[in-house]
Amino acid sequence: MEDIASQIVKRAVALGCQDAVADVVRNRSYQIRFARNEPVISNRWREATASVFLVVDKRVLASDIKDLSKVDETVERLVKIAKRSQENPDYAGIARGPFTYPRIRPDPRILALEDGSDHVAAAVNGALEMGATETAGSFWKYEEEHALETSNGAHGTDRRASLYLSIRALVSPEASGHGIAAATRLSRFEAGKAGRKAGRVAALVKSPKAGTAGTYDVVFDPLIFGSLTDQVAGRLSAWAVLAGLSPFGKKVGKRVASDAVTIHEDGSADSIARRRFDDEGVPTRRKPLVQKGILKTYLHNTTTAKRFGTRTTGNAGLVTPTHHAVFVKPGDWSKDEVFQEVRDGLWLTNTWYTRYQSYVTGDLSTIPRDGIFRIRKGEVVEAWKDVRVTDNLIRLMKNVVALSDRTEQMMWWGEVSVPNFVPYALIKGVRITRSAE
Amino acid sequence: MLDTDLVDFAVDHARTKGATYAEARYEHQDQESFILKNGVLDALYVSEDRGIGVRVLVKGALGFAATNLLTKPEVRATVDAALKAARTSKRKTPITFAQEQAYVRNWSVPEGKRLASVPTEARIEEIRDVDRAVMALGYKIPARYFFLGSSRIEKDFANSDGSRIRSYSPRLRFFYYLTVVHGSSVEQTHRNYGWSGGWEGIASWDLTNRVLEEAQSMQRSLVEGKKSPEGKMDLVVGPQVSGIAAHESCGHPTEADRVLGREASQAGKSFITPDMIGVKIGSDLVNVVDDPTLEHAIAHYLYDDEGVKARRRYLYKGGLVNEFLHNRETAAAMGTRSNGASRAVNYNVEAIVRMANTFVEPRDHALEELLEDVRYGVYMKSFMEWNIDDKRFNAKYAGREAYLIENGELKHPVRNTVIELTTPAFWSAVDAVGKDLDFEGGYCGKSDPGQALDASLGGPSMRLRNVYLR
């Protein structure tokens, strides 16, 4: 793999490229999807690809080479195409290496795992024990090897392996809950716990009634709070800011959340998205995005960093900077204290379809799914259905008043696009709407 | 060995090793795309992607494996991996497939001007022209983002029932975001167009005029727009709104895999249950169709990714639930036949039940006729924000371009009109359907790993009586 990465970069430079990056990836991931309490299909991948970034006279081209037996001729073809493109006057190069990277060893027990059926069974049984009658979800063993080479001297390899499970449990068609398990160590992978969480929430949903529109104090479960923090980190990509797809334009140094909120982005920390380097070969590192409510930085690659007069944050994608993993600093409230703080409000456990009326203003709505509960003084008094959060991303973050003292790793099907380590959060004055009949 | 011969080899090897059913799908996708952001071409993206996906049924369990390493030993290992996946699945209830006719066919989409013959420079210049025209309006447009992409998809499918189907499908897609500012107010839009065919598709879109009209309506909305009225009133929706409702509030809830719970954890379930064929959802005027055979629509195909012949499906007919979208697995589970709705986004994922080109069937009203009978209401021509719950019952569409209607006449623009209705409330309120059928392109998300698949969404203008707006 390293030879192929090197071959691509050398060939590109020989053909006139000023900058070249090749990330050769070997994918051996494995998945079990399950529904109605049993497997529906098992998927296995045996793929090798090279993600390539070439620059000729500021003409930028990105590609994925899938046929690694014809690397030289493919690079020649790509360089010819790049030369027919147009200059990107904003292009500012790639980071200058070499770099040193921390040693990361994937768990050999995960690498050796051939069959995830027991983990699926643990999750399903966990949910059924709590009263669920139906479950569905996915178990993943992610396994990738990367060999990265750049024309600016970065060179590294990275072997990544992790386990992930997502389970939805149902007691009836309108009574459901969701649980997540994620770990880079087999010993820390708690599929059964995820199943029990999903089942416990589902079992709490008894005869849900249509909710009432209004303004409520809301406890956000980690899964749905992770959806919000994922939105925050994703919209902090400098590329999104420049494209008008972010509410955080011109807000660095300004308040975007309450004092209670401190968020870091860190691809180097232990998570199922842990990686040694970004797509320019820059070592990933921890950096504050929001500190006590104040926006500290956008996420940058070398080009966007120059545009904003700063340095890369180690978040390069081939073209657009991106977040790898998000860490919310836990608060000093116990989970019970967070709930007890709510005199009369709601507890939301999951959401999907977060959509913006305006990315620039941050006006959005998102539609909760799974358990939706009316709570009084911390106690569930009834289950609701059919409501929607119709609010504003920055307003929601500014109204965070309490965070629990433990975080959980959440990631789920695009809604939480990368691992977000999040606590329970209490947000005051959340605007809730519902459909007319 | 030729790549396509590996397809036969994969099926034969799987059968030899004990699969009761086997299929192999080779795909070769050439893609070229770029984004012109604020007048700057960030990067050109070019890829040539190919590989084989193999799906097997062994003792009632499904296994799938994929590789892009196209050698005989690697394909053999991939088939073995699929067999292993099936054998270790520990499934108790056997999966069966509906019996379907086997076909040996070659089909392709007519390509007037071959996409491969259009130089990169010409593609970029086409979009630069749009960008220049928008900027010449003189509005304050702090962010503009135009995407143009083409893909050329060759498939070679074989299964152990004797089907062998080769196809070629060239496609074009254009989408954009615009941000227009006036004073302290901001208006954003997102539009998306798709085409199956050659470069002639770009002319059919009339992009410059469409984008200019959109920008002009945004500016007018900012300058003249007033608060949208709240309460129960009549609503006329444009084709873009009809299209998203057809897709979200009819197409998704009639996907049989969703109805059966196979997608429960991700894309969700459905408010429609297996026994609801014939149940009233909308007014008698509501026919919602999903039709992969529609020429030039971006999700056009003649045989699906299980080799089943495609056909038009009436999902809602006369306001009743009429038909589910099926693949062979869901059809068997419901005791019926597949209607050719099985698709995968690429070789490396399983084919599942998907919509293609979903639209409200047009009738005979002109837009003026829809409007003239409205004493007081809103004409919501297009939307920006939308979402719907996972059982597809509670939808929200927030207006982008909308106008007040008084005594049958369009008045000033109104901003951020919100339709937040249940699915039956929306479709039951339809009392007139227009003839101005139009389509937009979309990406339909489903499955795990996520498959963002080409789809088109369409419909004519429609009038809804006495619905709650805010």
Image: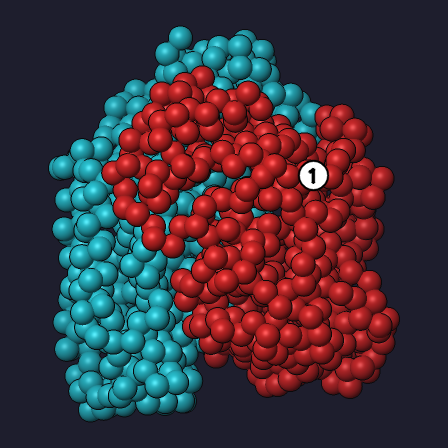
Tell me where residue A225 sits by quadrant: bottom right
Residue B252 seen:
yes
In the visual, does B432 lie left or right of A195? left
User: Is the residue marked by circle 1 packed among few (<14), some (14-19), or many (20+) residues within 10 Å?
Assistant: some
Residue under the point 45% across and 72% down: A360
Label 1 sits on a secondary structure element that is loop
Relative to B330, is B27 on the left or the right? left
Image height check: is B436 above or below A6?
below
Q: Does residue A166 appear left or right of residue B321 in this picture?
A: right
Residue A149 percent across, percent down from the top left: 54, 31
Which amino acid lies under the numbered mark 1 shown in the image of this protein?
Tyr
Q: Position of residue B254 (x, y in %)?
A: 44, 53
User: What residue lies at 85% left-to-right and 39% top-to-bottom?
Assistant: A187
User: Residue at position x 13%, y 37% from top?
Assistant: B112
Q: Colour of chain B?
A: cyan
In the rendered image, residue B104, in percent from the top left (x then y), is placed at: 30, 20
Above-or-below relation of A84 to B375: above
Count of marks, rendered view: 1
- The colour with which the image depicts chain A is red
The residue marked by circle 1 belongs to what chain? A
| Front position in the image: B317 or B173 | B173
Image quarter (top left, top right, bottom left or bottom right) of the N terminus of chain A: top right
| Colour setup of the view | by chain
Q: Nearer the viewer, residue A420 or B469?
A: A420
Q: Position of residue B373 (x, y in %)?
A: 20, 84
The residue tagged 1 is A101
Residue shown at 18% from the left, 64% from the top: B133
